Image: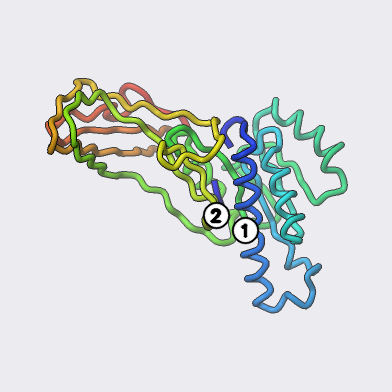
Amino acid sequence: MYFARNSLIRTRSAILNFIQAIYKALVHRSTKANSKGNHAHPENESSCQVVMVLGAGRGPLVNATLSASERANCPVRVYVVEKNPNALYTLQDRMTHEWRGLDVHLIAGDMRELDVPEKADIFVSELLGSFGDNELSPECLDGAQPHLKDLQESNARYTICTFPMDHEAIVHGLAGYFEAVLFDDVTLSTHPQRHSPQMVSWFPLAIPIERPQHVRPGERVTVHLWRVVEPRHVWYEWALTEPRPSRIHNAAGQAYKIAL
């Protein structure tokens, strides 16, 4: 079970959403464990939920996990994973002064090369970019998934979007947004019509079209979008097929690709 840190979570609204999502996940898993016979000994080791905070930054999601644990009355063992040396200085200080005596363990390194003594019940991560996965969240989390007890994959790689036009316009490109289900009904959204309140951490992604197209009322704009993954790089490709076909933009990552 995981829900997906920008370099920082900069809004209280996003933090509150993560606390709520982690709380619901802990309650869900605790209830599931109790139904299997652990309810008689809530302090039992098996009732402790193992949480891995992947890409912890300076620790806001660690505090969110601890707050959710206290609220759910569910003990947690937290593994804090971070590879950025600058962030590690802050995490080491918090381990000494703020999280001392708690079941919190700092692991310095890449989440794709984890060496931990047990598997996690819950992954907590926020590797979300303006377009949802353009900070390589799927690839980074894929590398850590062998350390997750309940493996669930949901990485879409290709989609077709169709937009019926009710007015005349010149189409210069697309705006990319994301909606993330953290857990159950707890979500984050940058969609203009469903934007999460007071969340300013992310901005839309601009997806340009080389040759703008004139569209009339009643026509459709259909876009094919690929997320291409190779061993060392990830990139996006896109093309219009309506109202008039365009070339495939950024084919083979020729203009831009993201290094893994």
- Compared to residue 85, the image places residue 145 above or below, namely below
* Quarter of the figure with the N terminus: bottom right
Q: Find the distance from the CA under tag 2 to the CA under tag 1.
A: 7 Å
Quarter of the image holding residue 30? Answer: bottom right
Q: Which mark is residue 144?
A: none
Q: Nearer the viewer, residue 133 or 198?
A: 198
Q: Nearer the viewer, residue 114 or 215?
A: 215
Q: Which mark is residue 24?
A: 1
- Per the image, label 2 sits on a secondary structure element best described as strand
Mark nearer the N terminus (2 vs 1):
1
Q: Is residue 160 left or right of residue 104?
A: left
Mark 2, Cα crowd under 10 Å, few <14 / some 14-19 / many 20+, is some
Q: From the top left corner, tell me how far across and down residue 222 is, in percent.
A: 20, 38
Q: Is residue 64 left or right of residue 6?
A: right
Q: From the top left corner, tell me how far across and down residue 231 is, in percent.
A: 42, 38
Q: From the top left corner, tell me how far across and down residue 121 is, in percent.
A: 63, 59
Quarter of the image holding residue 126? Answer: top right
Q: Residue at x 64, y 41 (%)?
A: 15
Q: Which residue is mark 2?
A: 183
Mark 1, Cα crowd under 10 Å, few <14 / some 14-19 / many 20+, is many
- Per the image, label 1 sits on a secondary structure element best described as helix
Q: Are marks 2 and 1 in contact (CB under 8 Å)?
A: yes
Q: Residue at x 37, y 33 (%)?
A: 176
Q: Residue at x 76, y 59 (%)?
A: 75
- Compared to residue 46, the image places residue 59 above or below, namely above
The amino acid on which the numbered mark 2 sits, given as a three-letter code, is Phe
